[in-house]
């Protein structure tokens, strides 16, 4: 699927300022089913934990560039910080895009990985594109159940925690690169290290300064806490904490095609690159959902794209409705489909 057939992304309404400083607040537009919306939120937030969704901590809905619904669990507010988990992968995608814009990285070229430079090492051909599309072919067991063998747990909290990219890059090929899709947090940390190499960054302080000056500060993400391992690599697979309103700003950057208040942050077609589908089997599409490049596809309905994180962290972009939905919580993995159904129900309230 080429970007030429992707739905057009909406532009910021002329009378609505970008939320670089504060978010505009508006009432839902005429035709919104506010009664159904209130009922959905009352149920999700009516108890600390519900049978369907587990814990819901925050829900934020942006339409036409303004907040039209916002609610937090008891004891939480807009001032609280929430985990990104794998939504950090989409932030890594944005950082890669910024260096692509500057000509410092080519996503179609072999990725920087010292571990793969042996004469006969077939991994040396793996590209950043294949890593971000989860099609690198590297063997990696993505499982968050401590009772199961899990490479991601070992990477984040075990033997790999001091150098997450090196840990991930040492896995052998299970498939020929670009021949199979398999979700892998390890590949995202290889991307993160490659971005730092392209930047010429040698310390986490330098890399964080780049993150803030080129991405977070220009769009008003003032309350962001990225985490680094001992080697200095941004743990771009999993750890970038922020407030719900700041995650919504990130979503707005992508819904606005990488342009913020007249300034292009991401290169042209970079958002289309994120939402262009990666080849997956019919079974994977059924069980996992569609995937682009470090963004998920279709979780809020046709043509939507999203940043998805463990236990139900979401930023869902709905181009057709010029709508963004941010959800934070603690939902067991086995109830993920309930959370997706809930988000689709919320989005449905805004469809006339």
Image: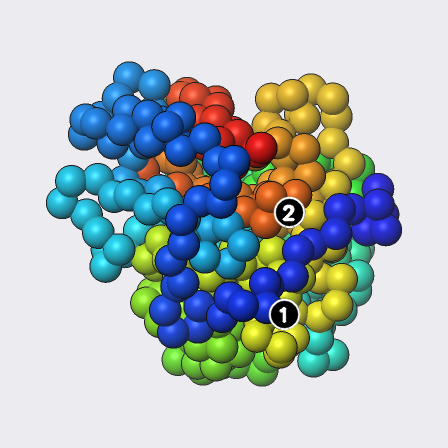
The spot of residue 192 in percent (x, y) is 55, 63
- The quadrant where residue 12 appears: bottom right
Q: Nearer the viewer, residue 131 or 282?
A: 282
The spot of residue 244 in percent (x, y) is 35, 53
- Total count of labels: 2
In the rendered view, tell whether residue 183 sits above or below residue 40.
below
Q: Could you tell me which secondary element the residue under label 1 belongs to?
A: strand
Q: Could you tell me which secondary element the residue under label 2 belongs to?
A: helix
Give the crowd class for mark 1: few <14, some 14-19, many >=20 residues within 10 Å.
some
Q: What residue do we see at 44% from left, 26% from top? A: 342
The spot of residue 284 in percent (x, y) is 67, 25
Q: What residue do we see at 75% from left, 52% from top? A: 8
Q: Could one spot residue 263 in this view of the protein?
A: yes
Can you identify the residue that label 2 sits on? 319
- Specify which label sits upstream in the sequence, 2 or 1: 1
Q: What residue do we see at 13% from left, 45% from top? A: 75
Q: Could one spot residue 228 in this view of the protein?
A: no
Q: Residue lying furthest left in this view?
A: 75
Q: What residue do we see at 33% from left, 46% from top? A: 70
Task: Please indicate whether residue 140 sits to the left or right of residue 34 in the image.
Answer: right
Can you identify the residue that label 1 sits on? 259
């Amino acid at each position: 699927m080429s970007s030429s057939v992707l739905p057009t992304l909406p532009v910021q309404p002329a009378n609505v300022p970008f939320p670089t400083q504060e978010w505009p607040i508006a009432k839902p537009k005429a035709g919104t089913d506010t009664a159904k919306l209130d009922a959905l939120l009352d149920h999700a937030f009516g108890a600390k934990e519900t049978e369907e969704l587990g814990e819901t901590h925050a829900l934020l809905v942006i339409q036409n560039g303004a907040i039209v619904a916002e609610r937090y669990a008891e004891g939480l507010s807009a001032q609280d910080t929430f985990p990104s988990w794998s939504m950090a992968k989409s932030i890594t995608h944005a950082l890669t895009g910024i260096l692509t814009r500057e000509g410092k990285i080519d996503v179609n070229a072999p990725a920087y990985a010292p571990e793969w430079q042996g004469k006969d090492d077939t991994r040396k051909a793996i590209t950043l594109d294949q890593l971000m599309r989860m099609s690198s072919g590297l063997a990696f067991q993505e499982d968050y159940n401590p009772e199961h063998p899990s490479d991601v747990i070992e990477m984040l909290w075990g033997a790999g925690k001091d150098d997450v990219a090196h840990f991930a890059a040492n896995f052998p090929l299970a498939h020929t690169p670009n021949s199979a899709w398999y979700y892998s947090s390890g590949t995202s940390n290889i991307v993160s290290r490659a971005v730092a190499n392209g930047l010429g960054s040698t310390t986490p302080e330098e890399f964080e300064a780049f993150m803030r000056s080129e991405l977070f500060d220009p769009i008003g993400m003032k309350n962001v806490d990225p985490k680094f391992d001992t080697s200095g690599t941004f743990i771009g697979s999993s750890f970038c904490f922020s407030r719900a309103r700041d995650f919504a700003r990130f979503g707005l950057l992508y819904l606005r095609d990488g342009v913020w208040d007249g300034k292009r942050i991401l290169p042209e077609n970079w958002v289309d690159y994120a939402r262009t589908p990666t080849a997956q089997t019919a079974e994977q599409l059924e069980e996992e959902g569609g995937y682009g490049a470090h963004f998920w596809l279709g979780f809020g309905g046709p043509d939507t794209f999203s940043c998805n994180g463990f236990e139900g962290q979401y930023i869902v972009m709905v181009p057709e409705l010029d709508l963004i939905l941010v959800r934070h919580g603690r939902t067991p993995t086995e109830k993920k489909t309930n959370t997706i159904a809930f988000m689709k129900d919320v989005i449905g309230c805004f469809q006339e």
